Image (cartoon, coloured by chain):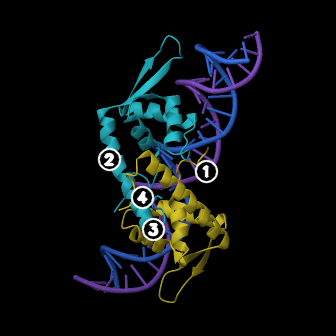
Chain colours: A yellow, B cyan, C blue, D purple
Amino acid sequence: MKFESQLLKGIAPVVVLEILSRGPMYGYELSQAIEQRSGDILTLGKGTLYPLLYNLEAKKLIKGKWESNKSSRKRRYYSITSKGKGQLVKQKAQLEKLTAGLNLVFGGALAPA
Amino acid sequence: MKFESQLLKGIAPVVVLEILSRGPMYGYELSQAIEQRSGDILTLGKGTLYPLLYNLEAKKLIKGKWESNKSSRKRRYYSITSKGKGQLVKQKAQLEKLTAGLNLVFGGALAPA
DNA sequence: TTTGCATATTATGTTATACAAACTATACAG
DNA sequence: CTGTATAGTTTGTATAACATAATATGCAAA
């Protein structure tokens, strides 16, 4: 049997989709949200995050929209699409499966606290 | 704070080190052991596994040795080095941290069964 | 008021993972 | 003697994640 899509080339997209599933955000905000929501464990550099966002948008998993409030810089807000929600469900299942596999190999040593 | 070394470029090396930490194995055997020990969830194709083994050997984390039993093909048995054991401990800790981070983001939905 | 800092996005180039696929070879069963 | 499972090597490809630099704006402090 084959673990679908690479051994683990990228939890990044799932993390982004998961966070966006709770409401629209712009890139800079997202990068901070990821750090905060992961207890400062996960970090996406801008060099990773922005290209990833473009990629997810090209795949129609998220949708971007420029907004320029009078007293702030132009920001591109991303929201998850229904296609993106579908992907999120699938990828989350994959991630669960992966962690299950890892726990088998490592004898449960990776169980969360 | 920064998650040391990539977001998750490769659990493959840790998995290999972990399995080799239980005793020497040759490539083909390893590829099967990984599948079996992960409940058929994790798979490393030969195109991934063998180059990875060369790489780990070059880094002195594992050590290979040709053995040709009279009635079987030549096999290269790999065993983990003490340097490799050190790395394994470190990387396992990183992996634990990573899964902890993921569980924070996904609200514990990734906890093993 | 101009210097500098935090915000916000874009773009470029590098490294290395993981993969598929083709190739070589050998032991053994039918 | 033919096919299949085993065993390993090699090549070429896509792309993930990264660092870094370039661009630009709002705001606070000096």
- Determine the CA span between mark 3 and mark 2: 23 Å
Q: Which residue is mark 4?
A: B99
Mark positioned earlier in the residue sequence (2 or 4): 2
Q: Inspect the image, locate mark 1, and give the three-letter code of the amino acid beneath it.
A: Glu
- Find disc 2 in the rendering and name its residue: B90
The residues tagged by marks 2 and 4 sit, at their Cα atoms, a distance apart of 14 Å
Q: Is residue A1 above or below residue A20?
A: above
Q: Residue at x 29, y 34 (%)?
A: B82
Residue at 66%, 73% in the rendered image: A82
Q: Are marks 1 and 3 on the same chain?
A: no
Q: Amino acid at mark 4?
A: Thr
* Distance between mark 2 and mark 1 Cα atoms: 27 Å
Query: Which one is in front, C5 or A34?
Result: A34
State if disc 4 and disc 2 touch (CB < 8 Å).
Answer: no
Q: Which numbered disc flags the more N-terminal residue, 4 or 3?
A: 4
The residue that label 1 is drawn on is: A4
Examine the rendered structure and indicate whether residue A37 appears above or below residue A73.
above
Q: Amino acid at mark 3?
A: Val
Q: Which mark is residue B105?
A: 3
Q: Nearer the viewer, residue A113 or B10?
A: A113
The chain containing the residue under callout 4 comes to B
